[in-house]
């Protein structure tokens, strides 16, 4: 009943300027990420309401393939969302893990955690499909990342909420984010 996430949210995707421009003008669509280390499984990834984190990712991309780092904005309706900040949805992931673990007999213990998360989430999607259940259109989760914000903090420098969009129809529009203007305006002497 509460899986349909109400309202729209903004997502930001770090990429090369040429990709951003092609997506905004409609000549290209973002590709699904299908890497085995993608935490939230296969889909199109966005930083939720975090332009700066998306830009940081583009500027420091691990593969160093982004020549002109920039950010693509998107208006997103998460739709039928697997929301991992929700207790009920975390239970689904735990159930998926329990079933997945039975089929591996110990192999998962040697697996990188991101790869394990990817496989557990993909297993959940496959289980739902085999039971003819409504597929999740998006996945949302909070991540703790980076060094402590200050000594003893529970916050990290790169904490974020990430969205993985499986149904591209959840993306309602793309845009080039504008920079903020000074507010309130400063009265300058004439």
Image: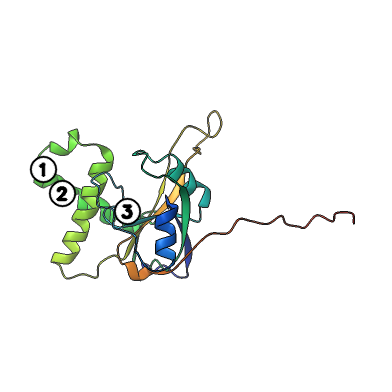
Q: Nearer the viewer, residue 91 or 45?
A: 45
Direction top: furthest residue: 151
Q: Are marks 1 and 2 in contact (CB under 8 Å)?
A: yes
Residue 72 percent across, percent down from the top left: 46, 57
Callout 2: helix, strand or loop? Answer: helix
Q: Is residue 55 above or below residue 18?
A: above
**Disc sitting over residue 70 in the figure:** none
Q: Which residue is mark 2?
A: 100
Mark 1 surroundings: few (<14), some (14-19) or many (≥20) residues within 10 A: few
Q: Nearer the viewer, residue 178 or 50?
A: 178
Q: Nearer the viewer, mark 1 or mark 3?
A: 1
Write the residue at 51% across / 61% down. Answer: 176
Q: Distance of mark 1 from mark 3, alpha carbons?
A: 21 Å
**Disc sitting over residue 90 in the figure:** 3
Q: Which residue is mark 1?
A: 104
Residue 54 percent across, percent down from the top left: 46, 49
Mark 3 surroundings: few (<14), some (14-19) or many (≥20) residues within 10 A: some
């Amino acid at each position: 009943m509460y899986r349909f996430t109400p309202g729209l949210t903004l997502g930001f995707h770090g990429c090369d300027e040429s990709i951003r421009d092609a997506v905004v003008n409609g000549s290209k669509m973002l590709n699904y990420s299908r890497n085995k280390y993608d935490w939230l499984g296969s889909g199109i990834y966005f930083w939720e309401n975090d332009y700066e984190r998306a830009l940081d990712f583009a500027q420091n991309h691990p593969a160093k393939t982004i020549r002109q780092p920039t950010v693509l904005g998107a208006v997103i309706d998460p739709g039928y969302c697997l929301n991992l900040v929700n207790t009920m949805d975390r239970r689904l992931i735990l159930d998926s893990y329990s079933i997945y673990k039975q089929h591996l007999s110990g192999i998962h213990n040697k697996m990188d955690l991101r790869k394990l998360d990817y496989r557990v989430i993909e297993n959940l999607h496959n289980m739902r499909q085999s039971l003819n259940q409504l597929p999740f259109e998006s996945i949302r989760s909070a991540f703790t990342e980076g060094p402590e914000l200050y000594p003893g903090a529970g916050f990290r420098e790169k904490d974020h909420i990430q969205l993985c969009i499986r149904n591209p129809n959840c993306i309602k529009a793309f845009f080039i984010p504008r920079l903020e203007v000074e507010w309130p305006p400063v009265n300058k002497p004439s």
